[in-house]
Image (tube, grey):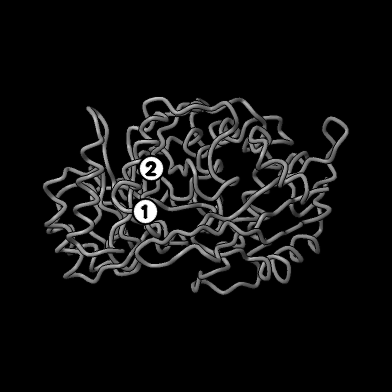
Amino acid sequence: MKIIDIRESTRPIKSNIRNAYIDFSKMTLSLVAVVTDVIRDGKPVVGYGFNSNGRYGQGGLIRERFAPRLLEAAPASLLDDSGDNLDPHKIWATLMSNEKPGGHGERSVAVGTIDMAVWDAVAKIAGLPLYQLLADRYGNGQANRKVFVYAAGGYYWPGQGVEGLEREMQSYLDRGYAVVKKKIGGASLAEDCKRIEAVLKLLGPGQRLAVDANGRFDLPTAIAYAKALSPYDLFWYEEAGDPLDFALQAELAQHYDKPMATGENLFSMQDARNLIRYGGMRADRDWLQFDCALSYGLVEYLRTLDMLRDNGWSPSRCIPHGGHQMSLAIAAGLGLGGNESYPDLFQPYGGFPDGVKVQDSYVTLPELPGIGFEGKADLYSEMCRLAS
């Protein structure tokens, strides 16, 4: 058993939208196929992966550095103790060989993308949905296929206006979402409050709004927004300041006693640990958004979950960024609090397998081997072109 090829293609996911920090007019991602010599139903088992939106494709790093390390490794060194499957932890160690600690940057995205494809292949070789494989290996054996999801959107669109924002948010509510999210910080505080109040008027009983500043604010601005947002009883106030400014986050907690969220731009267990140590996050109400596809993959994410438990945090306080099926599988298999969802944006990479419906902000995952990409026809057609 061995990996016989690793293929990468950099794909556009551009869109005419912006948040408080960047626009998405030139956004890309890396789509990866890990091809094995294991045959199922007459075809080689292929694992697929891709990185989340907001960080660009990593084709150069994947092709020049990380893929060659795996392909040059002795095949037996990448297998589990049974010899019947690949070992993601040994593969991760090979990917990271000869890499200095720290300076996570873009390499964490490259490794996370390959790691996703490896786990997809491992679960397919085992003949299991990834969520069940994770529950068996790292949980109590009981996967919870019903996963909370929220609708992320509310970007700043040219000419959208408040009416366009209302139509967008209503469409998410009509599709079964009870929690929706919009961007802040890309307009004035007064304009943002106007937009927030317009969305709040659409919400019925049990429906909530979250807001996301994408790290735009300095401390005075973050506090000014906190004071303005406090009366709204939001689902959360997300990433007010720079993701590595733990002092800002800790101080903000003194001015906003309702739930906050951050972590999507922290790319290692060590950075996540510093957030828990120094960022003033509160385990009884706040949310953590670490995204395995951007942060060295599930192997590193498992270390992060162990660290959180050691510090009194439940995995149920984790709702990952990214809106991809990998995090859905992790949520179902390891008891996370849910997952982000992009109902319309960044297609075909976001969303769920065909036929999966949102009901009261929950989806039930089908029993598909691996991550389940094969259940989403538009996405799987893109993947098949890469693997052919």
Taking 137 as reference, is 311 above or below it? below
> Can residue 148 be seen in this snapshot?
yes
Residue 209 in the image: state x and y as whole percent: 27, 42
Classify mark 1: helix, strand or loop. loop
Judge whether residue 302 can be spotted in this image. Answer: no
Q: Amino acid at mark 1?
A: Gln
Q: How many C-alpha atoms fall within 10 Å of the one at disc 2: few (<14), some, or many (≥20)?
A: some
Q: Is residue 34 left or right of residue 364?
A: right
Amino acid type for the residue under numbered disc 2: Glu
Residue indicated by mark 1:
160
In the picture provided, is 154 more to the left or to the right than 92? left
Q: For the view shown, which residue lies furthest in the right direction?
A: 42
Tally of marks: 2
Estimate how packed mark 1 is, as few (under 14), some (14 to 19) or many (20 or more) residues with alpha carbons within 10 Å. few
Q: Residue at x 65, y 38 (%)?
A: 373
Q: Is residue 135 above or below residue 93?
A: above
User: The N terminus is located in which quarter?
Assistant: top right
Residue 169 percent coordinates (x, y): 35, 41
- Residue at 36% x, 53% y is 160
| Residue that badge 2 annotates | 168
Q: CA distance from mark 2 to mark 1?
A: 10 Å
Frontmost residue, 217 versus 313: 217
Disc 2 vs disc 1: Cβ atoms closer than 8 Å? yes
**Where residue 370 sits: x, y (%)?**
66, 36
Q: Which is nearer the N-term, disc 2 or disc 1?
A: 1
Residue 364 rendering spot, x and y as whole percentages:
49, 26
Q: Quadrant of residue 193?
A: bottom left
Figure quadrant of residue 336? top left
Q: Secondary structure at mark 2?
A: helix
